Amino acid sequence: MKRLMIFILISFVFLGVKEVSLAQDQAVFKAEEIPLTLDEAVAIALRDNRDVLLQVEDVKKAKAQISESQASLFPTLNFTGSRTYTTGYYAEDLAQTTTQATLKQYLYKGGEAINTIEQDQYKLKASEALLDKIRLETVLNVEKAFYTLLLAGDFAHLNKAIVENTREHIKVIQARYKNGQASASDILSIQSSLSSTQEAYQDSLNQTEAAGVLLNNLLYLDETTRIRPDAEFTYEPMEIAYDEAFLKAMATRPEIRQYEAETKVDKKAIEIAKADNRPNIYASWDYYSRSHTGTTTSKNWNDYNVVGLTFSWPIFDGWQAKAKVEQAIVDLKETQLTKEKIIKDIALELKESYLSLKNAIAKIEAIEKDLLVYQDNLYTLGQKYKQGQASSLDKDDAELKYKVSLFNQKQAVYDYLIAKSSFDKATGGI
C-alpha cells in the first residue's frame, strides 16, 4: 500500500499539472476532429490572421502614398467653364460663355517634392519590415499553441491511464479488505487518491480545450472546429553558434530594418520642414475665352493666352519653419534612441532563447536515460508476469511508470521545440 501511495504522489509531483473528468472524456476524444499539420496551421494563420491582413493593407497604403507624392512632379491642368444668361439688365437679354484652362508646372519647391517621395519610400520599407515582424510573431504564436495542444492531449491520455490504474488498485484493496488483509482507512485513502486523479484528469481536458480555443483564435477558425494536431514530438540534435546567430539577428531582424527605415524617414522630414523657408518656382500657361450672345446678335468670341514664370520666397513666417525643423530633429533623436533600445532588447531575447535551447537539449539527454530505466523495468515485469512471478496489476504499474517517463520525454521535447521556435524568431526566422 505504501509503495502504491508513494508512486501516485511521485507521479503527481513529476508531472506538475492537473487534469479532467471521465464525463468530458467522451466529449473531447470522441468528437469529430480535423487533422492539421504544423505547416498547414502556419499557412492558414499567415493567410487569415487579422493582424497580418491589417498590416498587408498598411503596406498597400504606403505604396499608394508613394504614387501620391510622385504626382507633384507632373504638371497640373485645370479647366473651368461657365454659362450665364442675363435678362432685364441690358436693353437686350445677354448670354455669356467663359472658359479658362490653366497648365502649371513646378520647377522647384525647395526640395520638398523629391524629399517627400524618398520619405514615402522609406515609410514603405518600414511598413514591410513591420509586416515581417508580425508574421514572425504569428508563426511563433501558432507553433506554441500547436505544440501546447498536442502536449495537452497526450497529458490528458496519461491522466486517464492514471485514473484507470487507480481504480484497479481500489478493486484489489476492496478484495483484500473482504479477506481481512486491508483496513477501512486503506480504502478511504485510495478513494481519496482516485478523487485527486479524477480532478487532475478533468483539469487536463479543460487545458486541452483551452489550447484548442487559442489555436482556433490564431487561425481565425470557427469556435466549433476541433483541431487534432497531426504531429509527433521529435528531436533532432543541432549545433548552436551564438556569435553567428547574433550576426544573423542584427542583419535580418525586421525591427532593425524597420527603425533603420524610420530613421531615414525622420531625416527626410527635416529636409521637408526646411523647404518651408526656401523659394518656389513654377511656370504656368493660362488660356481664357469669353463669348457674348444677344437676342438679335451673333456670337462674339474673345480669347487670349497668358504665359508666366513665378518666383516666390517666404521672407518671414514667424519662425514657423524653424519650429518644424526642431520638432523633426527631436523625432529623429527619439527614433535613434528607440533603435538602440531595440538592438539591446534583441540581444537579450537572443541570449535568453539561446540558453533556454541549451537547457532543453540537456534536459532531453537526461530524461532519455531515465526512459531507458523504466523501459527495462517494464520488460522485466513483463517477463515475470509471463512466468507467474508478478500480477497483472504489477505489470500495469510498470506500464504506467513507463508512460509517465515517456510523457516527460515528450514534455522535454516540447520545451525544446518551443525554445527552438523562440530562437529562430530571435534570429529573424529560418
Image (cartoon, rainbow, N blue to C red):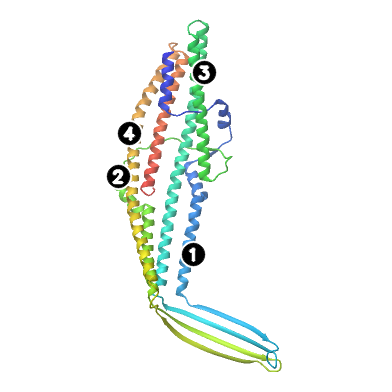
Up-down: is 318 above or below 160? Answer: below
Up-down: is 383 above or below 17? Answer: above
Q: Which residue is mark 1?
A: 64
| Amino acid at the residue labelled 4 | Ala
Percent coordinates x, y for residue 203 in the rendering: 50, 29
| Amino acid at the residue labelled 3 | Arg
Q: Cβ–Cβ below 8 Å for labels 4 and 3?
A: no
Q: Which residue is mark 4?
A: 362
Q: Which residue is mark 2?
A: 242
Q: Earlier in the sequence, mark 4 or mark 3?
A: 3
Q: CA distance from mark 4 to mark 3?
A: 36 Å
Q: Earlier in the sequence, mark 2 or mark 3?
A: 3
| Residue situated furthest top in the rendering | 180
Q: Look at discs 4 and 3 and give the one toward the viewer.
A: 3
Quadrant of the rendered image containing residue 96: bottom right
| Amino acid at the residue labelled 1 | Ala
Q: Residues within 10 Å of mark 1 (few under 14, many from 20)?
A: some
Q: Residue at x 54, y 79 (%)?
A: 78
Q: Residue at x 55, y 31 (%)?
A: 29
Percent coordinates x, y for residue 53 in the rendering: 51, 53
Would residue 229 be visible to someone looking at this image? no
Q: Which residue is mark 3?
A: 167
Numbered circles on residues, count: 4
| Amino acid at the residue labelled 2 | Tyr
Q: Nearer the viewer, residue 108 or 325?
A: 325
Q: Earlier in the sequence, mark 3 or mark 1?
A: 1
Quadrant of the rendered image containing residue 14: top left
Q: CA distance from mark 3 to mark 1?
A: 68 Å
